[in-house]
Each structure stands twice: as C-alpha cells, then as structure tokens.
Image (spheres, helix red, strand yellow):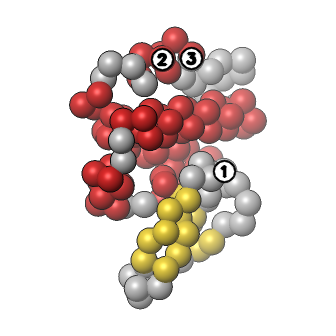
Amino acid sequence: MTVRNLSGIYFRTQDENDKWINLCFEELSKEEKDKIFTEKPVEWKNEMINLLIKVLNRINDDCKVFADDVELVDPALQQILVGEIVEAKDELIIGLSDLLKHIGDEFEISRGDETATE
C-alpha cells in the first residue's frame, strides 16, 4: 500500500505488527474510521467535511484532475453537506476520504514523503 498523506489529518494507529504509526485519515480502514466517529461530536464531523472538501478542491486546482476553474465541491453544496444531514455525516466523511484516496492512487498524487508498506 502506498501512503500518500494527502489530507494531512493524522491519527495514531497500530499496524499489523502492533507498531504505532501515524496515518492520514483517508488511509485508515473503515473500522478505524468508525471507531473515531463514535468518539467525536457533530462539530468535529462538520470540520472534517470542510477539511476534506478543501483538500479535494486544492488537489483539483493544483493537478487539474477534473477540470480547469471548477471547484469539485462548490461552497453552496458544502454548506448543505455540513448543515442538516446529521445522521449521514459518518458516511459522507468516509465517502470523501475514499474519493481522496482514490484520486491519489489513480493520479499518483502525494503530499510529502510516500511510504510503502507491505
């Protein structure tokens, strides 16, 4: 697995050898993400949505992944996403982080040092 460090939102986790490592949110397993969600309030989830959208838009701006002069998630949609849809926030965050990971893998984009693990 190539770790691309795209979001810059790091969490401590244990690898398969029980060694503690830092991984970006998008690199965590679904189980690890779900565990994080149980401990976090709605305000934290809203901030995660905003941060992931900002990273996706920045990557699109920098690398022209989708189109020139187009925001992947425009501000109006972003307001809706952090608004009333409280029960779907966990799935939305996972979807955004999966999209970020997929874009990084598909276009071989990384931020900082890449770390390959077996």
Q: Is residue 96 left or right of residue 104?
A: left
Per the image, the residue denoted by label 2 is 79
Tag 1: amino acid: Ile
Q: Residue at x 55, y 69 (%)?
A: 22
State the SS at label 1: loop
- Residue 55 is situated, as x and y percent measured from the top left of the image, at 62, 38
In what element is the residue under mark 2? helix
Q: Secondary structure at mark 3?
A: loop
For discs 3 and 2, the disc positioned in front in the rendered view:
2
Mark 3 or mark 1: whose residue is earlier in sequence: 3
Is residue 111 toward the left or the right of residue 95 in the image? right
Q: Are marks 3 and 2 in contact (CB under 8 Å)?
A: no
Label 3 CA crowd tier, 10 Å (few <14, some 14–19, many 20+)? few
Q: Amino acid at mark 2?
A: Gln
Q: Which mark is residue 74?
A: 3
Lower position in the chain sequence, tag 3 or tag 2: 3
Which callout, 2 or 1, points to the residue nearer the camera?
Answer: 2
**Going from the N terminus, do you reach mark 2 or mark 1 first?**
2
Q: Is residue 86 above or below residue 28?
A: above
Q: Position of residue 117 (x, y in %)?
A: 53, 77
Residue name at image x 42 percent, y 77 percent: 14
Q: CA distance from mark 3 to mark 2?
A: 9 Å
Structural distance between the alpha carbons of marks 2 and 1: 27 Å
Q: Nearer the viewer, residue 18 or 99?
A: 18
Query: What is the count of numbered marks?
Result: 3
**Residue 62, image x and y in percent?**
75, 35
Numbered badge on residue 94: none
Query: How far, Cα to Cα, is label 3 from label 1?
Result: 22 Å
**Res. 96 visible in picture:** no
Residue that appears at 44% across and 71% down: 13
What residue is shown with label 1?
109
Q: Which of pointers 3 and 1 indicates the residue nearer the eye?
A: 3
